[in-house]
Image (tube, rainbow, N blue to C red):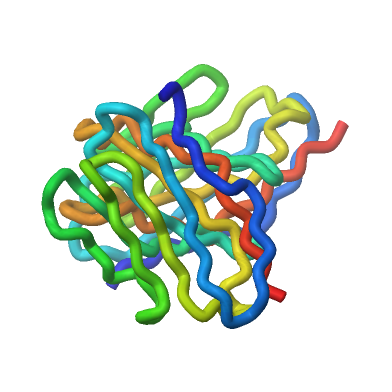
Amino acid sequence: GQSLEQPSEVTAVEGAIVQINCTYQTSGFYGLSWYQQHDGGAPTFLSYNALDGLEETGRFSSFLSRSDSYGYLLLQELQMKDSASYFCALNQAGTALIFGKGTTLSVSS
Amino acid sequence: GAGVSQSPSNKVTEKGKDVELRCDPISGHTALYWYRQSLGQGLEFLIYFQGNSAPDKSGLPSDRFSAERTGGSVSTLTIQRTQQEDSAVYLCASSSDRRNYGYTFGSGTRLTVV
């Protein structure tokens, strides 16, 4: 089967950099996705890594290492509005995304 | 439409009653997904529709749950004989064929079984 592990909570201060790690177990997959969900809101797509390496989208970057079964989401110049839950998810052939349990990020001033 | 629309946004029902939840995906999106999210938890996959293919029902927790997608567009998730453990937010998402575009989620239906 497939499984993903993420830390349940991360805290940081405004302006800092935070890394949310995701380790996974799967027999094969297309790539790793990241989603953001604010309290009471819908999950929104942040990034997708099909290949090993770093993908950068503004203040957010995502990394994938297939050999280590590991990825991370890097958030820079943290803002209060970044307080949310972040989910990694496996993209697999012929089926829906499998999500991790999510990491709650709390940003304080 | 511009986004994924779900209705109702909130539903309170009595234990044992049947409920129907509706999802209207983004026009042109071939794939439609249902997930369930309990308070403070992750997203639990329920069912997946892709074009005219048979749906992937592997995530449905019991035979009380069913879903259909009519005309490749609107989908209805039906829960029969609701139980208190069915209380959760039911999220629908749709996507195009391009997997790197990600899913677009609706705002969900918050179901409370009393």
| Residue A79 screen position, x and y as percent | 73, 26
Q: Is residue B12 left or right of residue A56?
A: right
- Residue B26 against residue B87 in the figure, above or below: above
Question: A43 or B63, which lies in front?
Answer: B63
Name the quadrant of the N terminus of chain A. Answer: bottom left
Q: Which residue is drawn at 59% across and 31% down?
A: A75
Name, please, the residue furthest toward the left: B53
| Tag count | 0
Q: Is residue B70 left or right of residue A35?
A: left
**Left or right: where B113 falls relative to A74:** right
Quarter of the rendering containing residue A98: bottom left
* Residue at 40% across, 51% down: A89
Name the residue: 58% across, 52% down. B109
What quarter of the picture does the C terminus of chain A occupy?
Answer: top right
Camera sees residue A4: yes
Outermost top residue: A58
Q: Is the residue B74 above or below the residue A13 in the image?
A: below
| Residue A51 seen in this snapshot | no
Q: Where is residue B49 in the image (x, y as percent from the top left)?
A: 25, 52
Residue A28 at x, y percent in the picture: 18, 58
Along the line of sight, which residue is nearer the eye, B114 or B42?
B114
- Closest to the observer, B36 or B77: B77
Identify the residue at horizontal 47%, vertical 29% (top origin). Answer: A61
- In this view, the residue farthest toward the front is B17
Relative placement, left or right, of A4 versus B99 is right
Q: Position of residue A2 (x, y in %)?
A: 31, 67
- Residue A55: name its quadrant: top left
